[in-house]
Image (cartoon, coloured by chain):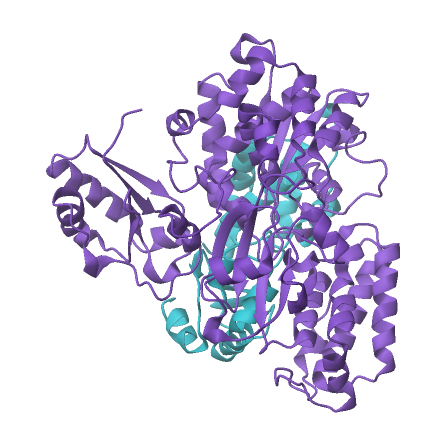
Amino acid sequence: MKAYRSMVLVTSGPASLQHGAQELYQRLQEEIDAFGLADEISLTTVSDLGRIDAIPMVIVYPEAVLYGPVTPDQAHYLVEEHLYKGRIAEELRAPVREMSGSIAWLRARQGTLPAEHRVVLQRAGIIDPENIDEYIINDGYEALAKMFTDMSPQDVITELSNSGLRGRGGAGFPVGRKWGFVAAAQGSPKYVICNADESEPGTFKDRLILEGDPHSIVESMIISAYAVGANKGYIYIRGEYPIGYDRLEKAIHQAHEYGLLGKNIFNSGFDFELHVHAGAGAYICGEETALIESIEGKRGEPRARPPYPPTYGLWGKPTLINNVETLANVPPIIRNGADWYRKIGTGSSPGTKVYTILGNVNVTGLIEVPMGITLREVINIYAKGMKNNATLKLVQTGGSSGSIVPASLQDTPMDFDSFQKAGVSLGSGALLICDETNCVVDLARVLMQFFRFESCGKCTPCRIGTQRSYEILTRITEGTAELHELDELLRLAHSMDMLSNCGLGQTAGVPIRDILKHFRAEVEAHIKLGVCPVGVCPMVPTVEQTAVPV
Amino acid sequence: MTIEERELEIPSIVRSAVEKHGATYEALVPILSEVNRVLGYIPGNALSEIKRQVHIPENSTFVSESQLFSLASFYHMLSTEPLGRHVVRFCESAPCHVMGGREVFEAVKDELQLRSGETSPDNKWSLITTSCLGVCGVGPVLLVDEDVYGNVRPEQVPDILAKYE
């Protein structure tokens, strides 16, 4: 690949295209040609960065200047000022005050944020995701070459075990062990699946990897297939991510052309075919057995486990399933070795974690940091503090099946074990930061509404339990609940936890337990005093909330 | 397309979907999605047509209409009923809620005079609540057809909706 003086990126996600990104791109290209800069400037498209207020955006590196919204007619001026004369076109810069979306990491690239450490997002937003050459020049497919040159399948698994990598989908299971199970399982053919059904509310880390660096997933799928002895793989991507789908399709096509997929890869005698499979809107399909059912052309209803997918997965065959972020960690580990990886993060949870930062803070967005930093650091450093200098009340982690973490735990290191000891969970890495204007009952009601809506209905405890819990929580917000119903809520939470078939039902009771553990007085005030202490809940019966059928 | 024209189109729409995804079990959801995308929903005769084209006993592929309906009614992005010309999808998840989603949703309902899950009598609008759309960094988020609107404030809702004919 050639070296360029500047890189110009034009956002071209669905929202940007709607606002003329295509024409802008063409005009920029024409202007760059007209100024004779084509050899010095590379022009590429990137995914939307979450700045709906300023799209389409143009980002110019190495200065990392954000322009937006830019109209096609401004292309001439922009190219002349910034790229030809080398002056930043101040008046076209994106408004700074409303920085949100993925802006946190753009700032990080300018070196203003400490401790960000990019492993899985090292290329996202820097390379053209639709160009395999840019991936290759940035260490891409190097792990694959190394593996085929001097590693046996067992070597790959050993390397991963030594790295201490744990699954990033929420459960934190040791990756090397899982791969070892599948490699050792009897039965053939075997399958590998990438779980890209990222549906936890507040979580969009996988989307950025899929849209920004799709080849990293293709590469690590090939590695995983080689390690466990599979010749066919699926990337199951949620239907709501059409851009990710297109980019993966393109990446697979390019990998085929380069002989990285198909028959006899690198003359190793190893064959591998990879398919992208789009979901059609079902949170539950993020559960691994529901995902398998969905690929098989059935309703996405979780299976009874055991047997687990490593022995009985897709079409009843041994199947390896990994989350996108987990897989994105694999090529760097193979490339740099387990010892390198061990140096990042904490002893029991090596590596980095991608967090999405949301809620009542000054900067929302996405960061990748070593495991073990604290909530206080996230809020004060990356999120630039609470909005309006409000006081932190709680943080809801990991989307809907995460925990409600009270402010008192904000100095607990965020890694799998420390959080477990504190009785909370890291979940999928969404951090919904709430100030004191949020009511815990209202929050729990919204979370329960989600579970009620997304419960697949297969098993009774979850189907009925989420509905009854929602009704009671709604009555508390309407001021018509009685005190003994709090015990009923805990009983429901217990039943769902013990009797549900899959993770959805088993964690649906967590918000109930958490609010009654940490904020019981606030909940009781609704019932005993008939007031919502923060004034969020209506405290009068509303018709609609109970009238919606399940 | 009028309803009659649509009926005539169904066999060819299904055929191109089957050609693209194959006549296998794993193609069923993608085929349904494709039909849903082209027609806006999945009419009953489309289910019959898919069955006709994918049910191939000699290939050990057995597909029934009830099975197809059970899929079409399970996945949220598929609809078995016709929707309005424009579909408003509103994210009801906690991140959007905390950022003021409730007020925005009230404004949407007021403006459209619809409740969640309803289609307006003139068939212009359908209002659907949806789970997370994955653009939470800019919540509350509103999706009108394919257009994403982020950082929505209640007072912007009328302007946003007025853009659609």
- Work out whether residue A176 or residue A509 is closer to the camera in this orientation and state it: A176
Chain letter, cyan: B
Q: Position of residue A223 (x, y in %)?
A: 60, 23
Q: Position of residue B134 (x, y in %)?
A: 53, 54
Residue A405 image-quadrant placement: bottom right
Residue A459 image-quadrant placement: bottom right
Viewed as shown, does residue A299 lie left or right of A130?
right
- Which quarter of the rendered picture does the C terminus of chain A lie within? bottom right
Residue at 65 percent across and 24 percent down: it is: A159
Chain letter, purple: A
Residue at 52 percent across and 51 percent down: it is: B39
The correct choice, above or below, for A472 with respect to A58 in the image is: below
Can I make out residue B84 in this image? no
Residue at 53 percent across and 47 percent down: it is: A369
Can I make out residue A442 in this image? yes
The correct choice, above or below, for B14 with respect to B161 in the image is: above
- Work out whether residue A384 or residue B11 is closer to the camera in this orientation and state it: A384
